[in-house]
Image (tube, helix red, strand yellow):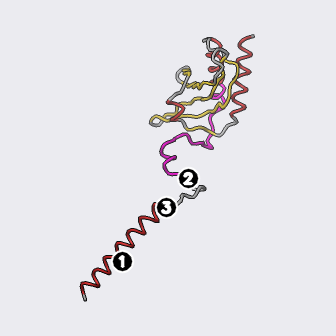
Amino acid sequence: MKRFNHLRYFTFVAILVFLTILFSCNTQVNKNEPNPKSSIDSTNVESKESIPDSVIQFLITSAAKDFNEHQPPTVIDLRDVKAGYFSSGNERTYLICGEFLSQEKRDWESFTTIKTSGYEQYLGSSIYCQKATFVVTDSNRLSVEIKNKLTNHKK
């Protein structure tokens, strides 16, 4: 009779383990909760911090100057321009990232303008934008400001 109780006990445990595994596999993630994997994969969070306006203006002017001085590509439109930074130790490096439409390709391409001792501008996908923390700004405003600078430099 003791053998029968052990068998029943092990059967109960096996069923309990099976049901636990089954229910854990079928658990749905609440869509309102952040996905922990996505927060690890992307560091492009928006911060409520601010970037000094003088830095943003410098980056906008530098981007417009570079687009005008190095053609092709000839920029005919800009969109989704965001200001942000990435950190290296205790130092922050500021940048703007966005997309431009070139007259030659007629296709949207990414660009990055980074504030260094001067500035650096990269066309195409950039690791800097993938690592950046962006501040909350009106990306349409930044795009318009660069377009205005482009127009003013051409005159």
Taking the image as shown, residue 155 lies to the left or right of residue 123, namely right
Residue 50: give x, y in percent of width and height: 63, 38
Query: Which residue in the protein does label 3 denote?
Result: 26
Specify few, some or many for label 3: CA neighbours under 10 Å numbering under 14, 14-19, or 20 or more.
few
Give the camera-side residue of 7 and 94: 7
- Examine the image and state in which quarter residue 149 appears: top right
Picture quarter with the C terminus: top right
> Which segment is the magenta one?
34-57
- Examine the image and state in which quarter residue 145 appears: top right
Residue 151: give x, y in percent of width and height: 74, 16
Q: Is residue 2 above or below residue 131?
A: below
Comparing labels 2 and 1, the label whose residue is closer to the camera:
1
Q: Amino acid at mark 1?
A: Phe
Q: Secondary structure at mark 3?
A: loop
Specify few, some or many for label 2: CA neighbours under 10 Å numbering under 14, 14-19, or 20 or more.
few
Q: Is residue 6 above or below residue 78?
A: below
Q: Amino acid at mark 2?
A: Pro
| Name of the residue lying farthest toward the bottom | 1
Mark 2 / mark 1, whichever is N-terminal: 1
Query: Which residue in the protein does label 2 denote?
Result: 34
Disc 1 from disc 3: Cα separation = 21 Å
Q: Amino acid at mark 3?
A: Asn
- Examine the image and state in which quarter residue 146 appears: top right
Query: Which residue in the protein does label 1 denote?
Result: 12
Residue depicted at 60% across the width and 12% down the height: 70
Specify few, some or many for label 1: CA neighbours under 10 Å numbering under 14, 14-19, or 20 or more.
few
Q: Is residue 23 above or below residue 31?
A: below
Residue 20: give x, y in percent of width and height: 42, 68
Residue 15: give x, y in percent of width and height: 38, 73
